[in-house]
Image (cartoon, rainbow, N blue to C red):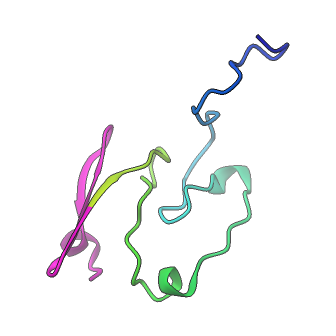
Amino acid sequence: MPANGQKTGSRRRPRGTGPWDPWTGADLGAGEWISHSPAQEAGLDVPRYCPECGRRRTVQVTPHGWTAVCPRHGETSSAESEQR
């Protein structure tokens, strides 16, 4: 085990301060710099990370919109966030 007490090879993200960027998962509270793609800036890409905890969400895209489920915070849909 390394001197800092963290496991090597762990896929866990270090606990951040949040809020989190819903498209990249960057910790905005920690001052991470992010660059969005043109599709993300136009609102055409589905937000794949939970803005509350930064976890990767399960996303389902349909012709009528999308739904995203965070294991901790539940389901969000394009109808709720007014995006299509």
Report the side of 46 relative to 54 (left or right): left
2 vs 72, left or right, is: right
Q: Which residues are magenta?
A: 60-84
Q: Residue at 50% of width from left, 47% of height from top?
A: 54
Q: Is residue 3 magenta?
A: no
Q: Is residue 82 above or below residue 32?
A: below
On screen, residue 57 versus residue 29, left or right, reads left
| Residue reaching furthest to the left | 64
Q: Quadrant of residue 78?
A: bottom left
Q: Quadrant of the N terminus?
A: top right
> At 62% from the left edge and 27% from the top edge, which residue is drawn?
10
* Residue 2 % position (x, y): 81, 15
Q: Judge by depth and name the residue closer to the eye, 65 or 1.
A: 1
Q: Is residue 49 above or below residue 65?
A: above
Instruction: Tell me the residue at 33%/37% (across/down).
Output: 72
Q: Position of residue 24 (x, y in %)?
A: 56, 62
> Residue 36 sits in which quadrant?
bottom right
Instruction: Quadrant for the C terminus, please.
Output: bottom left
Q: Is residue 81 magenta?
A: yes
